[in-house]
Image: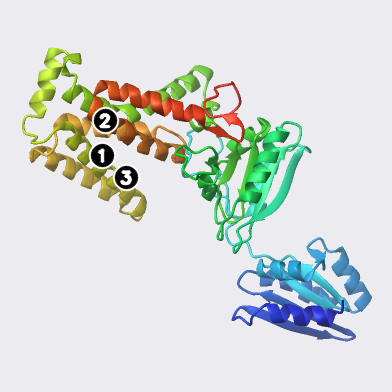
Amino acid sequence: MSIHHVKEALKAKIPKAEDLVIKELQATGKHLEVMYFKTISDEAQLQTYLIKPFYEISDPDQFLAYLQSHPKVKSFESEEKLQEELIRGMSILFFQEKVFLLDVKLEKNNAVSDTSAEITILGPQSGFSESLPTNIGLIRQRYPEETLMIESTNIGSISKTAVNILYDSKKVDKDVLKQVKDFLSAVEIEMFQSGEQLLDFTKKSHRVLFPTIMVTERPDRTVINIAAGKIILLVSGSPFAVLMPTVLKDQMASMADIYQTYWIGKFLLLLRYIGLFTTITLPALYVALVSYNPEVFRVQLALSVAGSRHAVPYPSFVEVILMLIMMELLMEASIRLPKAIGPTATTVGGLILGQAATEAGLVSTIMIIIVSLGAISNFVIPISTFSFAIRVSKYFILLLSIFYGLVGVILGLFILLAYMVSLDSFGKPYLTFREEKI
C-alpha cells in the first residue's frame, strides 16, 4: 500500500477541524509531512523529538534510522489503527514512503495530588492522578515485582477509553481473572469516563444495591490488594482505581488499620461496624420503640421521650422521615456547593433548621439527636460508594418498622442479611470474612 493512498484515506476519514494541523517540512533531500491535533498533542515534544532532529540530521538515511530507533516512534500497522491513534493524540509522520506514529500525547493532569476521599493521619498521603502512565508508575514504585502483569483494553463505543488491567500472575485466581475479562468485554456503553461507571454493570440485572467492586484513590491500598491476589483496573482520565473482587470486609477496611498498632486497628474496625449497625437501625428503632414498644424504655426515659414529643402533632414515623429527608438534602448540598461556602452554609443551615423545627413543634429534640447520630455513624464508613448504599438501606428497615414495630426492625435486618448473602463478587461470597489483606 503506497504512502499516498494511506495519506489520502486518512485525510478523507478525518474531517477538517480547527485544531487539526497538517504540516510539511522541507530540507535538502528530505521531505516530511506530519499530522496531529494541537489540542491533545504536545507541540513542545514535537519540536524536541521531530522538528529539531529533522533539520539537524542532514542525511535522510540517518534521519530514517533515528525515527526507527526512537522509543516514542511506532511503525504503521493499519489504517483503522492509524485513525484511532491520531484521535488519541499521536502524531502521524509520512517520510520516504513510510508511515510512523510519534507518541506526543499531551498529559494535562499528570500531577500527583493528595488524597481527598480516603484520608488517613498516618501513612502515604499521595493519590492517583488522571494520567494513566503516572498511575502505573505509582504502582510500579510500590510493587517492584516482575510478576506484575499489565494488559490493556478499550471500553466505550464512542469514547474508546483506555483501560489497564493489573494483577500479579503468581497470586491471581485464574478463574476470577477470566470472569473479569469476560465482564469487561460484555460492558456495552457509549461514553466510559471512570471506573465508577462499572458499579452498575457488575450484575446482569443492573439493580444491585451494594457495590461488589471497590473504587479507591490510594496507591498503597491498591498495591496491598494486588499482593492479596486481586485485579486492578486503571482508567485513563480517572484518578481512581477499581479493585475486583470486593466483599463486605474490604468495604469496611481502612488503610488506617495497618498504620496503627494491632489493638488500635481492631478498635477502629469495631467502631466502623458499630457505626454501620447504628446508621442502619437507629431511625427504625426510634419509630418502633416510641410508637409500638415504649415499655422497653426505663420509666424516666419513656417520660422524657414523651415529654419531648408533646408538641409534635403527628406520628413518630412522619417526624423521622421529615428529618431524614432534611439531612439528605443537607448532605447533598454540602457536596454540590462551592468549597468556599459549602461547609459554612450547611452547618449554619442545619443548626438553624434544627432549632427552628424544634421550637415550632415540628420535631422533638430527641429526634435531632437520633438523626445527627445516624449521619455521623454513616460518615465512619471509609468507602463512599458503600456508605451511599447504607444510606438507602436504612429506609427499607424504617418502612418495616412503621408497620410492624420492633419485629419489623428484626425482620428487615434478616432480609438485608439474606440479600447480602445472595451477592457475590466475581465468584467470591459477599459476606466472606476469611482473613486476607486489605
Determine which residue is flagged by label 1: 324
Indicate whether 205 appears above or below 42: above
Q: Whole-Å distance between the Cαs marked 1 and 2?
A: 9 Å
Q: Is residue 409 found left or right of 382 in the rendered image? A: left
Crowdedness of circle 2 by 10 Å Cα count: few (<14), some, many (20+)? many
Coloration of the structure image: rainbow
Q: In the rendered image, which quarter contains the N terminus?
A: bottom right
Residue 122 shows up from this direction: no
Relative to 368, say whether 40 is above or below.
Answer: below
Residue at 50 percent of width and 31 percent of height: 254
Nearer the N terminus, badge 1 or badge 2?
A: 2
Question: Which of 171/95 is in front?
Answer: 171
Q: Position of residue 13 (x, y in %)?
A: 69, 78
Question: In the depicted view, which residue is nearer to us: 349 or 319?
Answer: 319
Identify the residue under disc 3.
Answer: 331
Say which of 35 and 113 sits in front: 35
Q: Residues within 10 Å of mark 1 (few under 14, many from 20)?
A: many
> Image quadrant for the C terminus?
top right
Q: Please report contact status of discs 1 and 2: CB closer than 8 Å, yes or no.
A: yes
Residue 154, picture quadrant = bottom right
Name above or below for residue 207 compared with residue 95: above
Cα separation, mark 2 vs mark 3, equals 17 Å
The residue that label 2 is drawn on is 283
- The numbered mark, 2 or 3, whose residue comes first in the sequence reads 2
Quadrant in the picture for residue 327:
top left
Labels 1 and 3: the sequence-earlier one: 1
Q: Residue at x 19, y 19 (%)?
A: 293
**Image coords of residue 119 (percent x, y):** 47, 38
The label nearer to you, 2 versus 3, is 2
Residue kind at label 2, given as amino acid type: Pro
Residue 246 percent coordinates (x, y)? 56, 34
Q: Residue at x 8, y 25 (%)?
A: 307
